[in-house]
Image (cartoon, rainbow, N blue to C red):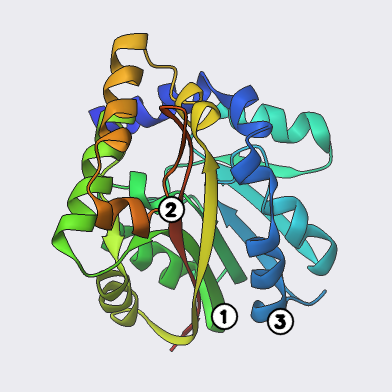
C-alpha cells in the first residue's frame, strides 16, 4: 500500500467515533436529495464508496435491492457493522476494487474523493463497475473558479489534514467526470461546519489548531463572505463551504 493510502487508513481508523457523530456527516439532506435524483429502486445493486460509518449507506439502503459498503478503514467499517450487523462491508482501496466488471447499477461516494491521489483512476474504476446505464452519485467539496478563494481553503484544509489532496473547482469536477460519464444533474449544497468540532475531528495539537483559527480570523473580506465565516467575540463559530452534487450515467 502506498504511503498516502496508509496515512489515510490510519487517519480514519483513529477517528471513526468522531466521524460517526460529526454534525456535518450526520445531516443527510444532501444524501436524501441524491437518493431522489438517482431514482434508486429495489432493482438496484448499490455500492457506497468510502462509506465511513455509513451515513450515506444507510440512507440508500431501504431503496435498493442489495447494498455494499466499501472503505479503506477497518475501524470505520466495524462501526458501520455495529449499527447493522447484516451490512455487506468490504475493506477496499477506492482506486482498485475487488469486484467484477459491471457488478453494480448504482454507486455513490460522499465527501471522500478529495483524499484520493488519482481521481481519474477512481472514476475509471467506477465506470468499470457500473452496468451500462448505471448511475454514479458524487458529493464532494468544491470551490468557485477563483484562485484566491481556492488558495485560502486549500491552505486551511492541508494544514488541518495531511490526507487532503485537493479541493477541486466546479469546472475541474465537471471536466474530470465528463471524461467518463454523461452528467444528468449538477447542483450545489452549502454545508455549515461548526468550527471547533471540525477542528477536533482532525486530532490536532493546540498550536496547529490556533494557527488555523488565526487564518479564519484574519481572512480577507471576500473569503469571509464566500465561506460565511461566523465570528463572535474574537472566536470562530463556523464556516460554510460548497459541496457539488452530481448524478452521472455510464455511457
- Looking at the image, which residue is at 66% across and 42% down? 89
Q: Position of residue 187 (x, y in %)?
A: 50, 77
Mark 1 or mark 2: which comes first in sequence? 1
Query: Mark 2 near mark 3, Cβ–Cβ under 8 Å?
Result: no
Q: CA distance from mark 2 to mark 3?
A: 33 Å
Q: What SS does tag 2 mark?
A: loop
Q: What SS does tag 1 mark?
A: strand
Is 166 or 42 nearer to us in this picture?
166
Mark 3, mark 1: which one is toward the viewer? 3
- Say if 77 sits above or below 28 in the image: above
Q: CA distance from mark 3 to mark 1?
A: 11 Å
Mark 3 or mark 1: which comes first in sequence? 3
Q: What SS does tag 3 mark?
A: loop
- Looking at the image, which residue is at 51% across and 23% down? 13
Q: Which mark is residue 134?
A: 1
- Quadrant placement of the N terminus: top left
- Quadrant placement of the C terminus: bottom left
Neighbourhood count class around disc 2 (C-alpha, 10 Å): few under 14, some 14–19, many 20 upward: some
Mark 2 or mark 3: which comes first in sequence? 3
Neighbourhood count class around disc 3 (C-alpha, 10 Å): few under 14, some 14–19, many 20 upward: few
- Image side of residue 217 versus residue 103, left or right: left
Q: Position of residue 46 (x, y in %)?
A: 67, 64
Q: Position of residue 226 (x, y in %)?
A: 35, 59
Neighbourhood count class around disc 1 (C-alpha, 10 Å): few under 14, some 14–19, many 20 upward: many
Q: Which residue is mark 2?
A: 228
Q: Which residue is mark 3?
A: 39
Q: CA distance from mark 1 to mark 2?
A: 37 Å
- Looking at the image, which residue is at 26% across and 22% down? 211
Amino acid at each position: 500500500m502506498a504511503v498516502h493510502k496508509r496515512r489515510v487508513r490510519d487517519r480514519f481508523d483513529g477517528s471513526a467515533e468522531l466521524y460517526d457523530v460529526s454534525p456535518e456527516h450526520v445531516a443527510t439532506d444532501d444524501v436524501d436529495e441524491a437518493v431522489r435524483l438517482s431514482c434508486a429502486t429495489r432493482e438496484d445493486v448499490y455500492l457506497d464508496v468510502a462509506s465511513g460509518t455509513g451515513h450515506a449507506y444507510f440512507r440508500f439502503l431501504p431503496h435498493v435491492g442489495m447494498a455494499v459498503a466499501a472503505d479503506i478503514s477497518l475501524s470505520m467499517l466495524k462501526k458501520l457493522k455495529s449499527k447493522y450487523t447484516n451490512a455487506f462491508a468490504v475493506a477496499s482501496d477506492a482506486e482498485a476494487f475487488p469486484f467484477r466488471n459491471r457488478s453494480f447499477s448504482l454507486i455513490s461516494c460522499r465527501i471522500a474523493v478529495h483524499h484520493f491521489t488519482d481521481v481519474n483512476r477512481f472514476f475509471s474504476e467506477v465506470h468499470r463497475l457500473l452496468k451500462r446505464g448505471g448511475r454514479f452519485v458524487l458529493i464532494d467539496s468544491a470551490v468557485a473558479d477563483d484562485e484566491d478563494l481556492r488558495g485560502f481553503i486549500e491552505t486551511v484544509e492541508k494544514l488541518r489534514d495531511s490526507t487532503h489532496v485537493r479541493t477541486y473547482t466546479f469546472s475541474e469536477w465537471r471536466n474530470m467526470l465528463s471524461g467518463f460519464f454523461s452528467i444528468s444533474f449538477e447542483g450545489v449544497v452549502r454545508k455549515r461546519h461548526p468550527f471547533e468540532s471540525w477542528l477536533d475531528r482532525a486530532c490536532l495539537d493546540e498550536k496547529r489548531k490556533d494557527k488555523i483559527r488565526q487564518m479564519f480570523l484574519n481572512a480577507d473580506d471576500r473569503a469571509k463572505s464566500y465561506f460565511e465565516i461566523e465570528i463572535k467575540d474574537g472566536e470562530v463559530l463556523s464556516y460554510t463551504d460548497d459541496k457539488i452534487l452530481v448524478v452521472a450515467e455510464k455511457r
